[in-house]
Amino acid sequence: IISCNICQLRFNSDSQAAAHYKGTKHAKKLKALEAMKNKQKSVTAKDSAKTTFTSITTNTINTSSDKT
């Protein structure tokens, strides 16, 4: 059985699957999925950078406070 996990469809033949993969509905869903993955990566990277900055700032403040 041939299936498209992105569109949740099953095909009876290779020719049906090939036609589907070349179609606009599949292309739109694929593009949306890729955009969502890219958005998640950028949000994760921003959260990571924010956490690192917060850690550095907190450590700097704590170190300065300890010396006084």
Image (spheres, helix red, strand yellow):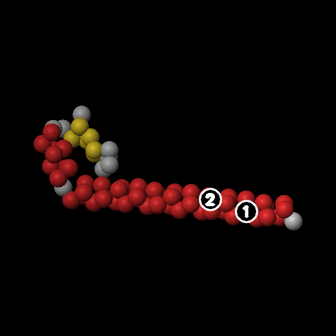
Please, is residue 65 above or below residue 18 in the view?
below
Residue for point 17% across, 53% down: 22
Residue beneath disc 1: 60
Q: How would you rate the neighbour count of disc 1 (Cα within 10 Å): few for under 14, some for 14-19, many for 20 or more?
A: few
Q: Which numbered disc, 1 or 2, marks the residue that appears first in the sequence?
A: 2
Place of residue 25 in the rendered image (x, y in percent of width and height, measured from the top left): 24, 58
Place of residue 23 in the rendered image (x, y in percent of width and height, measured from the top left): 18, 55
Residue beneath disc 2: 51
Q: How would you rate the neighbour count of disc 2 (Cα within 10 Å): few for under 14, some for 14-19, many for 20 or more?
A: few
Q: Amino acid at mark 2?
A: Thr
Q: Amino acid at mark 1?
A: Thr
- The quadrant of the rendering that contains the C terminus is bottom right
Residue for point 73% across, 62% down: 60
Quick one: SS at disc 2?
helix
Quick one: SS at disc 1?
helix
The residue lying toward the viewer, choosing from 25 and 49, is: 49
